[in-house]
Image: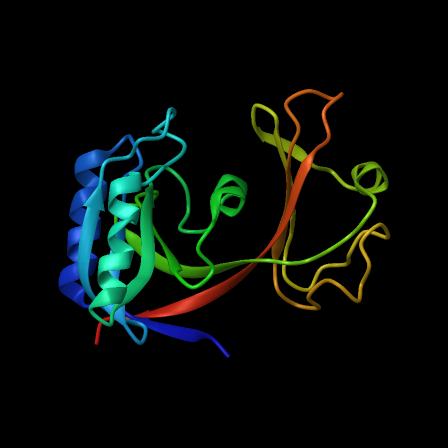
Amino acid sequence: MTRELVLPFSLQLQIIDQSLAGKPEEICGIVRGRDRQATALVPSRNVAEERTINYLVEPSVLMQQFAFEDAGDSMVAIYHSHPESAAYPSATDAWTAAYPESVYLICSLEVLQPVIRGFELLDIEADFDLTAFKQQTSFYETRPGLFAWYRAAGTPLPQALDRTCFPARDPFYVVWFQPDPADEPEVRVVCIGEFRIKSH
């Protein structure tokens, strides 16, 4: 069952306005709320090096989540924009996701009418042979040294992946960072679940 995040229309408009103003760069920020109901935005500067294709929320903004918690609230979401691509997590988004309790909101400006969608990005504990996996899949380099493979919902798994460890239906990314072939790769498997966005 699709879960829900209540994001008032006024906050959606703020995200869209910030996204349009920041184009062609990605914008970002965090969302304060309680019980999956958003109450306020905290916009952030995008401090990533390549801001047209990536985002990074300022550490000082992320630290505000502790003040939220002191008041009984939480960081219910983290948002960013995709100026030229769909409102769906990229491999880089999956790699950098570090807050499993927060919804990841993406505002797409790919078409004339901006679109906001929400996602849960969760790590899967999985042990598999990366060398065999690479031989069986068409992976790609999404950033220098960052490689990825995307499994669409319901499609077959490569033989290298243990079927008992991976979701039967949900889409997921296998992403790994290996800037030098001689280095030991850092590997993450990130499952994607969608949140329905409600305005009230």
- The answer to whether residue 154 of the structure is visible from this angle is yes
Q: Quadrant of residue 181?
A: top right
In percent of width and height, residue 81 lies at: 32, 44
In percent of width and height, residue 134 lies at: 79, 37
Describe residue 15's horizontal placement relative to residue 100 as left or right: left
In percent of width and height, residue 45 lies at: 23, 36
Describe residue 71's horizontal placement relative to residue 49 as left or right: left
Q: Residue furthest bottom?
A: 1
Q: Quadrant of residue 6?
A: bottom left
- In the rendered view of the protein, which quadrant contains the C terminus? bottom left
Is residue 148 positioned above or below 117 on the image?
Answer: above
Residue at horizontal 66%, vertical 28%? 178
Instruction: Please name whichever residue, 164 or 23, is drawn nearer the observer in this view of the structure.
Output: 164
Instruction: Please name whichever residue, 122 or 14, is drawn nearer the observer in this view of the structure.
Output: 122
- The answer to whether residue 149 of the structure is visible from this angle is no
Residue at horizontal 46%, vertical 65%? 194
Residue at horizontal 61%, vertical 55%? 172
